[in-house]
Amino acid sequence: MKLDVLAFVLGTAFTITGIFAFFSPEVFFGLLGDYYGVFNSHFVKDAGIAFVSSGGLILLSCKISKWRVPLTLGGSLFIILHGLFHVQMLAMGMAPTALDLAKELIIIISPSVATAVLLSLRIREDLQDPVTKNEVGF
């Protein structure tokens, strides 16, 4: 149950982020640091679609017990890999100021870590409780 709360919070946040990026790409991009380069509407909308997909799968994992781990895995892949990419970018000196570094850590990397924790705990839970594999939350 506690994992469903975490999944709901993360899934909702990713879905809202994706909707915002898709429907207001210029505004969304304007909130990013100058070090992100030149605005590209197609790229920002693609990112929005990825976030909506991830969020939707994570939210769905709260409803379908039988598919909890596969849905969490599907929803987590982009988020975790996106966070790892930003860790690599930070290691290469991407964030020019301490504020930029803090924003990257709080807005992108922390949710990625939380998503990785969610995935690992869901896998652990699934291995310990085979009963939920046959339940459907609809």
Image (tube, rainbow, N blue to C red):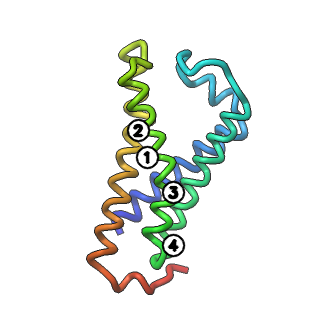
* Badge 4 element: loop
Which of pointers 4 and 3 lies earlier in the amino acid sequence?
A: 4
Q: Nearer the viewer, mark 4 or mark 3?
A: 3
Q: Which residue is mark 4?
A: 63
Q: Amino acid at mark 3?
A: Gly
The label number, if any, that marks residue 84 in the structure image: 2
Residues under labels 1 and 2: Cα distance?
6 Å
Residues under labels 1 and 4: Cα distance?
22 Å
Q: Which residue is mark 1?
A: 80
Q: Is residue 110 left or right of residue 42?
A: left
Q: Amino acid at mark 4?
A: Lys
Residues tagged 1 and 2 counted as in contact (Cβ below 8 A): yes
Which of pointers 2 and 4 lies earlier in the amino acid sequence?
A: 4
Instruction: Pick whichever, 12 or 95, lies toward us.
Output: 95
Which quarter of the picture shows residue 90?
A: top left
Residues under labels 2 and 4: Cα distance?
28 Å
